[in-house]
Amino acid sequence: MAPPASAQPLMTAQDLLALPQPPADRTIAWGPAPQQVAELRLPKGRGPHPVVIVVHGGCWQAPWGFDHVRGLAAALTAEGWATWSLEYRRLGDPGGGWPGTILDVARGADRLRETARDHPLDLDRVVALGHSAGGQLALWLAARPRLPGGSPLRTGTPLRLRGVVSLAGITDLRAGAASGVCGDAIPQLLGGPPQDHAGRLSQSSPIERLPLGVPVRLVCGARDAIVPIGQARAYEAAAKRAGDRVAVEVVEGAGHFELVAPGSSAYPAVRDAVRSFVPR
């Protein structure tokens, strides 16, 4: 008899990095920095195809790039969605941190408009999906149309989203910093302790940008020891009070990295969350 899910070993970061990394159809530069690129994958068929913007995690830090989500992006594309996997400047990269890291995700997402001129993409059916720190960035993509006029994070006309899928996402930067999520990466991202940068915090922490006006699905691993499930639960409660549509799904037996590993017990929940917003 197989051991219960709670007794099975959890996937590690090294396990995730050891998975196959299928190549993209195209790698497209959307800015001058070497990190300002995106990987485009197209499903079979003529399209136009719905699109999943994939935002990787890694505590916003330079050692973690989009290589570790290539398998997830390829799996979603095999399911019938085009994927646009964003790289961006991170802590340790020139220009990373505030506001460069966050602006990069905005500009990389908006580059889809130009990309759709040459590829069969349906920009009326776009979902943002982010893992861990990428969950914060994906939720922020939905929040940015309501940024205050003087915010340095404002850009042109933000790409419209059908929904956001947060995978073990960091939804509350203030609470995350207080509990040591990602060590000291949150203060590094903000340029100092959250209490010293209230304006930056209010402009970038998803829970402080509610309501988003976009439906959200938060998928978490029951055994996640990196981003507490309390982040998703607190966000769910606050979002519902603000009038947003939001749901949390907890995958029993899963930890942090299973959420971006195709073939894991968590993958069906991830696939179904995307499907709930943009059926193929």
Image (cartoon, rainbow, N blue to C red):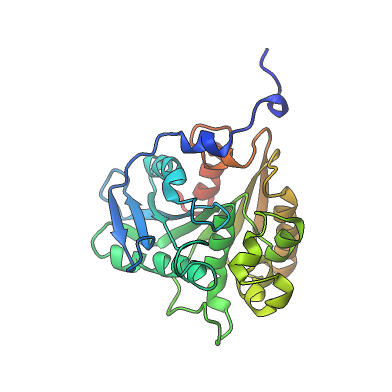
Quadrant of the rendered structure where residue 50 is? bottom left
- Could you say which quadrant of the image residue 110 lies in? bottom left
> Do we see residue 264 in this rendering?
yes
- Name the residue nearer the viewer: 202 or 273: 202
- Measured as percent of width and height from the top left, residue 144 is found at 54, 73
Side of 78 where 11 appears, left or right = right
83 displayed left or right of 169: left
The foreground one among 202 and 62 is 62
Quarter of the figure with residue 124 = bottom left
Q: Residue at x 31, y 55 (%)?
A: 48
Q: Position of residue 97 (x, y in %)?
A: 53, 68
Residue 209 sits above or below residue 10 on the image: below
Residue 212 shows up from this direction: no
Q: Quadrant of the N terminus?
A: top right
How many callouts does the rendering have?
A: 0
Residue 89 in picture, x, y percent from top left: 45, 63
Residue 56 placement (x, y as % from top left): 50, 52
Q: Residue furthest left?
A: 118
Residue at the spot x=71%, y=25% of the render? 7
Query: Which residue shows up at 69% across the image and 19% down it?
Result: 3
- Which residue is most to the top? 1
